[in-house]
Amino acid sequence: MKFMLDTTDRRILRQLLADPSAANAALAERAGVTPASLWRRLERMREAGVLRGIQARIDWRAMGWEVEVSLRFTLDKTDPRAFDQFLAALREVPEVIEIQSFLGSVDWRASVIARDMAHWQQVYRDRILTLPHIAELDALMLVATIKDSGELAL
Amino acid sequence: MSGLDTTDLAILRVLAHDATTSAADVGRAVGIGQPAAWRRIRRLTEQGVIAGRRVVLDPAALGFGVTVFLGIKLAAKGRTGLEDFERAVTAIPEVQLVQHVLGQFDYRLRITARDISDFERILRRRIMTLPGVGQVEANVMLSEERRPGPLG
């Protein structure tokens, strides 16, 4: 059965998305519910899998990883095992922080980080260009993240 | 790594999985006491390594079945062009991510829509009407995973 959110659940999620670091008491007040009710509703949404989790956002630049690149891969699909083998190899690259697969002109995308340009060159040559079944590859170098919100028009 | 030791990295691993873990539980997970864990979490936050929290929802369960990544090339360059575009694009609620990039495109966007026709509406009414927008490439996401990266 599909989980149905009521207007109170939506209000809670909107407040949570707007300020994920807020204490439960503050969230409850903003959403107009008691802290006990907030906790109960969040638990219910967790159990239903609607709320998958609240994770710490790591700033890799603050940790000295200065370079972030979005790599877009098109695979050679003549080999039926290409997708699985490519994904397995990509997961082994420790500098990869995010992977998506697509329907479209691009098959896979990965966010890859490096300490500096010299390190990037090394990661790119030794770990990326050696991945199996790549037909095409292009790179977008991150200049700045202008917006990054989990915002949903709930 | 800006003076971070293996205990710091272990703490980041725990919090990157669940940011609501208490300092006592973080301490237990990495083998230190609650006060020491609390001090380290505070330092990592002050250093900006822990840069807030991310709420992870299941968009499909909430009625948002389609996530699309867009590559956008601006027709008009120059600094005012960038600023006008950025101001307008960040105001679109369906746009979750805006990154200024170098390469084949100038910006990459992540958009969450209810379905393909909802996405088409957003693309036509909101994206194609943005100031300075040129070539647009769209790729519909099938699956996604976050990796621990250098945290191992």
Image (cartoon, rainbow, N blue to C red):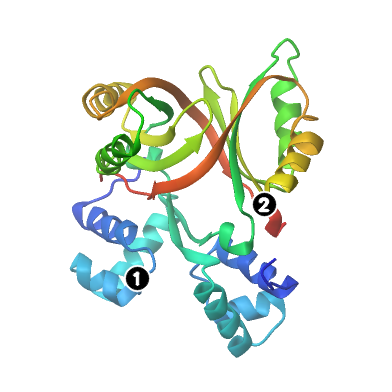
**Picture quarter containing residue B97?**
top left
Q: Are marks 1 and 2 on the same chain?
A: no
Q: Residue at x 38, y 55 (%)?
A: A45
Q: Which residue is mark 2?
A: B149
- Looking at the image, residue B29 sits to the left or right of residue A54; the answer is right
Q: Chain of mark 1?
A: A
Query: Which residue is nearer to you in this view: B115 or A119?
Result: A119
Query: Which residue is nearer to you in this view: B121 or B28?
Result: B121
* Helix, strand or loop status at disc 1: loop
The CA span between labels 1 and 2 is: 27 Å
Q: Amino acid at mark 2?
A: Gly
Can the viewer see residue B64?
no
Query: Which residue is nearer to you in this view: B63 or B54?
Result: B54
**Picture quarter containing residue A81?**
top right
Q: Residue at x 74, y 47 (%)?
A: A119
Could you classify mark 2 by the number of other residues whose Cα lies within 10 Å: few (under 14), some (14-19), or many (20 or more)?
some
Residue A75, above or below B1: above
Q: Chain of mark 2?
A: B
Q: Residue at x 51, y 18 (%)?
A: A104
Residue B67, above or below B10: above
Q: Residue at x 21, y 25 (%)?
A: B125
- Looking at the image, residue A93 sits to the left or right of residue A62; the answer is right
Q: Residue furthest top?
A: A78
